[in-house]
Image (cartoon, rainbow, N blue to C red):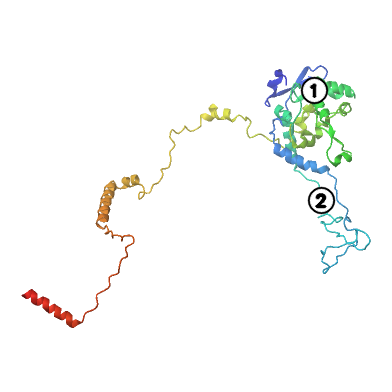
Amino acid sequence: INAEYMGLFVMARPQVSVFNFDNKQVSGAVKLPAVFNAPIRGDIVHFVFTNMNKNHRQPYAVSKKAGHQTSAESWGTGRAVARIPRVPGGGTHRAGQAAYGNMCRGGRMFAPTKIWRRWHRKSNTTLKRHAVAAALAASSTIGLVQARGHRIDNIPELPLVLSGVENIPTKTKIAVEILKRFGADQDVQKVKDSRKIRSGKGKMRNRRHVQRRGPLIIYNEDHGLVKAFRNIPGVELSCVSRLNLLQLAPGGHVGRLIIWTESAFKQLDKHFGSFSGYSLPKSLVHNADLTRIINSDEIQSVLKPIKSKPRRAPQKKNPLKNMSAMLKLNPHAIVQKRVGRRKAAKKTAEKKPKTATAPKAGVKRHRKTPSPALPSAILTAAKKQKTEKASA
């Protein structure tokens, strides 16, 4: 993008330049429609695109008779084979082969497809309008247009509005010159270089080639514009009164390169603005620079002052296990603990058991045998002798 137009890419700008298609000179300016200030909701665009893209599918199904065009019957039990139905007859390989089942060669598929499947999807009207508004807003954002793969290095401004282009002669040569004049020929060349043969069976079904998307030209009235541009590869045309999300966001990805005619650009507020029964979505945050918002004087003036030291909840400690916590409750606890240790040490010293001498290795200890019991008469006599000696 040329540096002289960089200041015009801010979405809050009130006007958009209008270029004359003959000499690339700015012929005037138009007010920026409100739809370009709508929030860019990629999730809504992708959801609506997915639903709308299903509405042009054609029903398909396998034949109702497929896999059942034989009079197969099971052989029953007792023949050491599975009880699947088998083709009758003989003299051919087909005879005796299993049939009907989805696991059988020549059998039907599992859950045969039917044409009464729910092919199409409905979408809410308001949701579709939100999606179109988001796609239009994204078409004026340089980053999203470039991210989608469009070549816009030489385009003077986004959105690109041309005056007098609706009344050009129906000649493709003139249309190509207009695209070259405004730098859109690089995008057309990208489309030509991307053309290749489709992978898969679509190449045999009248869809042989695939290619990228080029610029989309939106007009209000056709006075030869469609015939002039319709044969250029990748270029698509659409009327402003019937814009299609499938063209505004191919593949569900916003950022299509759009070339507007002046009359179509002026009709946007009428067709895609707020009216009775519908209001354009508004952004919750108009300025995405959160750092600038937070540091602004308006926000900082109402904030609470910064706390110097955040107060932390004290950790509760068990006084029975933590001495410092116990000393706060009982300063005499350390003296009691010392006295208790001394008493315990003294008590253990007094109760020291006598150490028994262990027998020497190789020495066998004999058990003492008790003395035999003496008769009571002998004992009494011995006692008398002791007493007499003691008296003498």
Give the quadrant of the C terminus.
bottom left
Residue at disc 2, secondary structure = loop
Outermost residue toward the front in this view: 362
Q: Quadrant of residue 253?
A: top right
Q: Are marks 1 and 2 in contact (CB under 8 Å)?
A: no
Number of marks drawn: 2
Left or right of residue 216: residue 313 = left
Vertical position of residue 304 compared to residue 340: above or below: above
Amino acid carrying label 2: it is Arg
Residue to which mark 1 is pinned: 162
Amino acid carrying label 1: it is Leu
Going 48% across and 33% down the picture, which residue do you hit?
A: 304
Across and down, in percent, residue 103 comes to 81, 56
Vertical position of residue 333 compared to residue 73: above or below: above
Vertical position of residue 298 compared to residue 98: above or below: above
- Residue density around tag 1, few if under 14, some if 14–19, many if 20 or more, within 10 Å: many
Residue to which mark 2 is pinned: 117
Across and down, in percent, residue 108 comes to 85, 56
